[in-house]
Amino acid sequence: MTMMSDRLRRPAAVSALSVFVLALAGCAGSMPTLPSLGLGTSAGAFTLSSPDIPAGSVIASRFVLNGFGCKGENVSPALVWKNPPAGTRSYAIQVYDPDAPTGSGFWHWGVYNIPASVTSLAQGAGNSAATLPAGANGGHSDFFDTGATGGNGNWGGPCPPVGDKPHRYVFTVFALGVDNLHAAAGIPKTGSAALHGFVLNKGLGDKLLGKASFTATYGR
């Protein structure tokens, strides 16, 4: 008789608990968040890093511009990205200084149409079109036609005005669900870095599968 009584009482207990949970949800405005069991999650987050420029570090002179009063070596840093989203067909990279006193920031580098099989760029890869991965192309930076980078489309290192608070340099890799950014977006390879940035962040819509960034600083 005791076992039968327990069985009869259990649904009532469960119902009472359900009412209590729903009451809490009503107070909070939504159902409580339950702990994740990790089911269906990816192996890890999409990340970008550099063995040459750790996130949050001060950029070394090897990667600083040689020109406009700066005395660096203007070598492009090595970059590594991991755990790309499923369906990635190509990558793009941009480097941007939001602190430049231009009213629009300053674009230091862009590399587009990097094949999906490539997950890193070696140090110096951005100093010549010939050293980029096959199929990839450098895009115009804000050093366009100055000769400071040795050629349009190459890496242009930091060179902020003397006396400025150290500028931030944001490195970003974009994982795309298209093989060729320019064909998909209908823009020329010679388009500005800002035009490419618009397409990457907005214009491609759901073909932007993910992006990862890190920031480093430099001042003089």
Image (cartoon, rainbow, N blue to C red):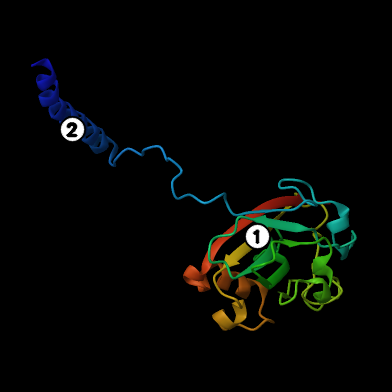
| Residue sitting at the far top | 2
Q: Quadrant of residue 64?
A: bottom right
Q: Nearer the viewer, residue 25 or 69?
A: 25
What residue sits right under mark 1 in the picture?
172
What crowding class fits label 2: few (fewer than 14 Cα within 10 Å), some (14-19), or many (20 or more)? few
Counting from the top left corner in percent of width and height, residue 110 is at: 71, 69
Where disc 1 sits, the SS reads: strand
Tell me if residue 117 can be seen.
yes
Residue 153 appears at what percent x and percent y? Answer: 77, 75
Residue 197 appears left or right of 167: left
Number of numbered tags placed on the structure image: 2
Residue kind at label 1, given as amino acid type:
Thr
Element assignment for label 2: helix
In-image side of 40 versus 92 (left or right) = left
The residue identified by callout 2 is 19
Residue at 55% x, 80% y: name it: 184
Q: Label 1 neighbourhood size at 10 Å, few (<14), some (14-19), many (20+)?
A: many
- Asked if residue 107 lies left or right of residue 17, the reply is right
The residue sitting at the left extreme is: 1
Q: Amino acid at mark 2?
A: Val
Q: Nearer the viewer, residue 134 or 156?
A: 134
Name above or below for residue 144 compared with residue 158: below
- Residue beneath the point at 10% across and 20% down: 5
**Residue 130 falls in image quadrant:** bottom right
**Gap in Å between the C-alphas at discs 1 and 2?**
48 Å
Q: Nearer the viewer, residue 86 or 69?
A: 86
